[in-house]
Amino acid sequence: MIMTDNASHQKTGVQIAKKAREVHTFARPALSFPDARTAFLAFMQELDLSQDDEILLPAYIGWSSREGSGVFDPVEVIGARFRFYRVTRELAIDVNDVSQKLSSGRVKLLVVIHYFGYPDRNLAKVVAQAHDQGALVLEDEAHALYSDWIGGICGRFGDAAIMSIHKMLPCDSGGLLILNRLSSETLKALANSSLRAPLQCNPLDYDLAAISVKRRNNALHLIQLLKPLRGKANLLYRSLPKGVIPQSLPILISDESRDDLYFKLNEGGFGVVSLYHTLIDSIPESEFPDSHWLSRHILNLPVHQDAHLVKFRELVAQLACLL
């Protein structure tokens, strides 16, 4: 006998509903802003920072005349106290330094940056340390939109995350503030922030899964082509872990001038980037020598969805001639 819905319910009770109805299960409210730095500014404005509260940031933040200093600009705008934690020459978080600086009890917010789309291998550990000390955590995912939405490997550890739409898609603007574990009052205040703006470019208009596959394939192809150049041009990250969808492929130039290579490769039509080529003045070389060493040696090769595999062979051949 075929049971009707009502009869079935009366006989057995509802064990699993026909569809999901719990609005809070896996909810991640996303608020739109003109860009990621404005989203970060709005977030900090709601933290109610005291004069003694500190924001702890990684000691690898760049500056350019065209874009300013990204994540650091909002910190200066609100006049917050700040400190920096060390990173290694592999651009990894110095966990011991983070732990020591969190122990002061003054850190209200820890900022973790997923450089080039690669979350740090100690991400979960430092987030747990911050929460143990009563600090909030913000994940800067300006380069990690795909590693979050498609890879699912970041963006969920911290209390909030910021994303940059225009850095990862062919859009002129757009940023998101993703909220994971904040009060309903904070969420309401941020939703009503005067800094908010609608997205002019909808990420869902794009096949994000296909873009992610293309970016990973491009990166893997480049990694193979670069093997003969080991010792002269080395990968910053030795592998491409599962879930990582890179913003670019960072390499370290050993002997030649990184700046000369940058200009010559771009003159040849290869759109390489020198991200973080100049660190902000607040990160002195005397205190953070590894950060400055990195900034002088790193070169970012394009792996975006518009790049074609056949051109990578020409790029690496030109790079080999210059090394």
Image (tube, rainbow, N blue to C red):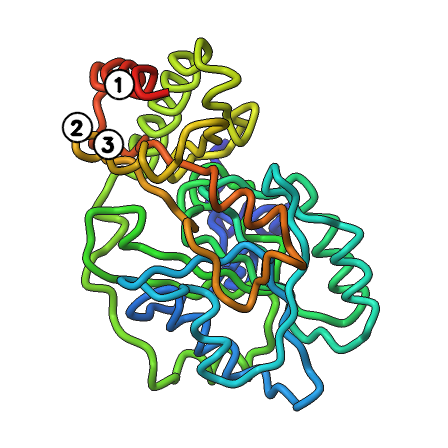
The kind of secondary structure element at disc 2 is loop
- Disc number at residue 268? 2
The crowd level at tag 1 (other Cα within 10 Å; few <14, some 14-19, many 20+) is: some
Residue shown at the point (60%, 50%) measured from the top left: 14
Label 1 vs 2, first from the N-terminus: 2
Q: Are marks 1 and 2 in contact (CB under 8 Å)?
A: yes
Q: Are marks 2 and 3 in contact (CB under 8 Å)?
A: yes
The kind of secondary structure element at disc 1 is helix
The kind of secondary structure element at disc 3 is helix
Type of residue at label 2? Answer: Gly
Horizontal and vertical percent position of residue 56: 64, 67
Instruction: Find residue 135 and report its image quarter.
Output: bottom right
- Disc number at residue 169? none
Q: Are marks 1 and 3 in contact (CB under 8 Å)?
A: yes
Q: Which residue is mark 1?
A: 318
Residue shown at the point (32%, 77%) measured from the top left: 196
- Disc number at residue 264? 3
* Residue closest to the eye, 22 or 320: 320
Residue 279 as seen in the image, left or right of residue 87: left
Vertically, is 155 above or below 150?
below
Residue 175 as seen in the image, left or right of residue 161: left
Type of residue at label 1? Answer: Gln
* Residue closest to the eye, 133 or 106: 106
